[in-house]
Image: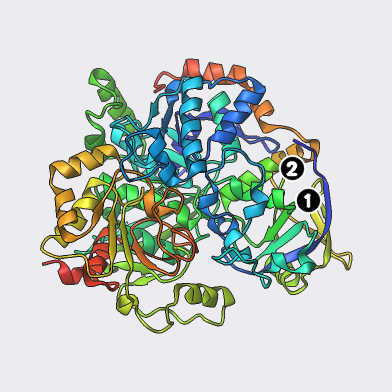
Amino acid sequence: MQAINRIRSRTVVLPTKDIDTDQIIPARFLTTTSREGLGDVLFHDLRFAADGTRNDHFVLNTPAAAGCEILVAGNNLGCGSSREHAPWALLDYGIRAVISTEIADIFRNNSLKNGLIPIVVDAQTHEYLLQNAGIELDIDVKSSTLTLPDGKIVEFPIDGFARYCLVEGIDQLGFLQTHMNSIENYEETRSWMP
Amino acid sequence: MTGATTLFEKTWSDHVVVAETADTPAVLYVDLHLIHEVTTPQAFTVLRTEGLSVRRPDLTLATMDHSTPTLPVSSFKDLAIVGESAAKQIVRMEENCRDFGIELFGFDSEHRGIVHVIGPELGATQPGKTIVCGDSHTSTHGAFGALAFGIGTTEVSHVLATQCLLQRKPKTLAINVAGRLPPGVTSKDLILAIIGEIGVDGGTGHVIEFRGAAISALDMEARMTVCNMSIEAGARAGMIAPDDTTFEYLHGRPRSPRGANWDAAVSRWRTLQSDPGVEFDRSVTLDAGNLQPMVTFGTNPGMVIGINDPVPDNTADPSFRKALDYMRVTAGKPLTETAVDVVFVGSCTNSRLSDLRQAADLITGHKVADGVRMLVVPGSQQIKKDAEALGLDRIFVAAGAEWRESGCSMCLGMNGDTVGNGQLSVSTSNRNFEGRQGVGARTILASPLTATASAICGRVADPRAYLQ
Ligand code: SF4
């Protein structure tokens, strides 16, 4: 995986609460066998009407959203399915960090494994971000901070190991494989092994 | 009480290969890895690119359920009915299982079915195991006292290659349910009420243990319905301590231990209880006796009310208003006057024999209302066979419902079974997200009884009116 440390970008704001993975990428697009090209169907049913026409009012379709790499969502982002297609679609579209007050466990895990930075902020910062779409944020993964345009620094929680892997570009499978001996020992010593 | 531990903690510590530190997560061993066609192709690609093999094909159980058609297929050519890419995905699953030596319960198998239905049915799901699958409803298996949770595709590749996962230890949440469910109120209503109470993010970061008299009184199929939806409260997993009900269910199943191994397993399983007086990080208490049939009115499973209650008026909140607009329901009014287009009885939440039986009993002597489409989809080929032996299929067909091959079907719109744009569906599945059952589909989640009563009535209906 590529090392990721800083993301500097304007925000795009989708203030809806409880955005679930079916909204991020509808199930009918999960029949793919690769991870490429999913950006085309990101938020598909919000970006396009049933007849395929583009919904110009949807925030991602507005000119101001072009090039934004940080998505600020309403409370509680990413509930629902375990589909890793959700972070794949966001990344493929060009989103590199997502911000909310709460981020669902599996979605957060999947994001971290793919280099999409899940950021949980306090209610006050969240409200400020919701009210000020398009501001430029500076995210620093190593120090787990984001800097607002006025210079205010907000810390965000991120698992230390996940952060290390992101910043160093470490592949977690490779890390697991360094424990192969312990895994073998465990299998041998457990008498009630299925 | 010092040293007291929870069921979750016991199961967790039994599977720690390398302990967690401040800097690194634990390496956790996986006893059973369930795989299906939708979330695995990219994981197998990782193995192929890195030249890796599957470490424990014997602990890996594969089936096809999500993108498979529920109309009978006689050959692979027929798969085109679900679309070209879905057909390709199904073929890829066959190739991957063949190349990596994994037994696949595929089209020709009498054991094929929804992954969370066949694990328990085969006896592969057992107390104290760690069970994972690239699917959030893996929480279902927690009904047996297993620690079971959904993972993403990258993690699927980790488990395939190492039989282990990197995990941080979650917190614990006790949900104590006292009393007994009244007639016409099922475990589906109970779990919907719980989600309504704690919210769709109420369990985030936690493993739930469902406890109390009302939980102990449930049979295994009803317990699976409860644990299935723990993920809808955001929980990492849901667990129920194993007891005689669990052991009776597992006894004699194809993958259950036999003879002396069975006795040894049961004595071990009996130790899988939270110690008396143990403290959970959080706890919530409910009385099952106060519950009524529950229905969702919005676009997440936490937006739920009693069948005769009015839709709450929270319309100052734009997200809430958006959900009501999407569902085309009115604040202040109950849902019982709402016309129904589709009724779906199926999914890993409610497609087991007892669910189908309840639906069949209720519909006997009635017809599906004019203009309503009712689809009944058993969770596995085994359930299909058992239901047909009881004549349930004939009851459904005589009433005007469709009877299908097993699969995820209308739970999610990716296999040919969908709810039309704008149509209202009363569904026994677990997610009422926008578009989940098809573009523009409006989903009301309910129990098999409520869904069936609604099919008969043509409007969202209280099943208790039909229970004599
Ligand atoms: S029935 Fe629905 S929830 Fe269950 S595994 Fe299939 S798609 Fe997922």
What is the spatial separation of the Cα atoms under label 2 and label 1, in whole angstroms?
8 Å
Is there a contact, CB below 8 Å, between mark 2 and mark 1?
yes
The numbered disc on residue A94 is: none
Q: Amino acid at mark 1?
A: Ser
Residue extending farthest bottom: B332
Q: Residue at x 42, y 78 (%)?
A: B329
Dividing the picture into quadrants, the one containing residue A164 is: top right
Q: Residues within 10 Å of mark 1 (few under 14, many from 20)?
A: some
Q: Does label 2 or label 1 sit earlier along the sequence? A: 1
Left or right position of A9 against B401: right
Report helix, strand or loop for mark 2: helix
Task: Judge: label 1 CB < 8 Å from ligand 1.
Answer: no
Residue B163 appears left or right of A41: left
Q: Which residue is mark 1?
A: A144
Q: Quadrant of residue B119?
A: top left
Depth check: A46 or B17 in front?
Answer: A46
Residue on which disc 2 sits:
A163
Q: Is residue B295 above or below residue B415?
A: below
Q: Is residue B468 above or below residue B132?
A: below
Compared to residue B185, the image places residue B86 above or below, namely above
Q: Nearer the viewer, residue B30 or B340?
A: B340
